[in-house]
Image (cartoon, grey):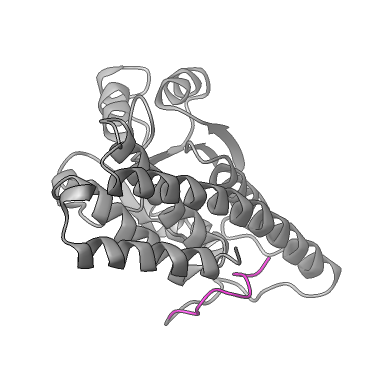
Amino acid sequence: MSAGSGRAELPGDRWADPPPDGPEALAEERLLAAFERRATAANLDRVVRVAALLERGETGTLDEAGRPEAESLAHQVVGSAGTFGHPAASLDAARLERFFGSGAPVHERPWEERERARATLDRLTAELGG
Amino acid sequence: MSGVTEQVRRVLVVDDDELLREVAKASLELVAGWEVSTASSGQEAEELAREQHPDLIMLDVMMPGQDGPTTFARLREDERTEDIPVVFLTAKNNTEGWQGSGLAGVIAKPFDAMRLAAQVSRLLGWDA
């Protein structure tokens, strides 16, 4: 099992023991790749839901439950995307989590702030391959 | 497969994200050879902790319904589970409020599946 092809290697990011090779390593690679495919699909679905909530926020139709829902969805992407090979997507999801987690109602935010959120959402979607 | 520890540990992984639960379980079982059970909520974690009394509970912080800190507090209040070490799994940056709470440690999400067992062993002082 490896850390995944899209994952940035960190300093000191090494095995406690030498990594296995041969058929065992191949099986682990395939297992993690399967996890990554499923996680990426789940995260794209979450991002689509966040996009819909942002749109409602911009039109002033986001109800009280919508904002914590968007924050929670973004938070889930933070942990999942980073673990499954998309560190940049994890960082962008964290930006969206902060956007929904504090501040004025979305439709009352400055235009530039909402535009940044939209751009972050677009970038996040692209990072996940959507 | 080279194991991180020689002793078989029993770990309960609690996370509302199914895939994170699965990858943590697969990693800890494959890399370290530990026995891993999983729960998807705080309530389920309490039940399993009482039944199994694992060597460690890895507990997600932000979950719908009963969150991680609430679950941790309830585990500490129950004499059947009060002595089980708990490590928080979290994507939150601010962990200052948890210092001195009796937590065994905090592991940041995202985590590297292949290093998870080594991280846990280091936190718990388990032989590596």
Q: Position of residue A108 (x, y in %)?
A: 15, 50
The residue at the point 25 percent across, 57 percent down is B93
The residue at the point 56 percent across, 73 percent down is A15
Q: Position of residue B91 (x, y in %)?
A: 35, 53
Q: Is residue A86 visible?
A: yes
- Which image quarter holds the N terminus of chain A? bottom right
Task: Report the side of B64 relative to A57 (left or right).
Answer: right
Q: Nearer the viewer, residue B42 or A48?
A: A48
Whether B71 is drawn above or below A84: the answer is above
Magenta portion: prevailing SS class: loop
Q: Position of residue B94 (x, y in %)?
A: 20, 54
Q: Nearer the viewer, residue B73 or A124?
A: A124
Which stretch is magenta?
A1-10
Task: Report the side of B99 relative to A88 (left or right).
Answer: left
Seen as rendered, the residue at the extreme bottom is: A11
Task: Report the side of B97 relative to B117 (left or right).
Answer: left
Seen as rendered, the residue at the extreme right is: A23
Q: Nearer the viewer, residue B103 or B71?
A: B71
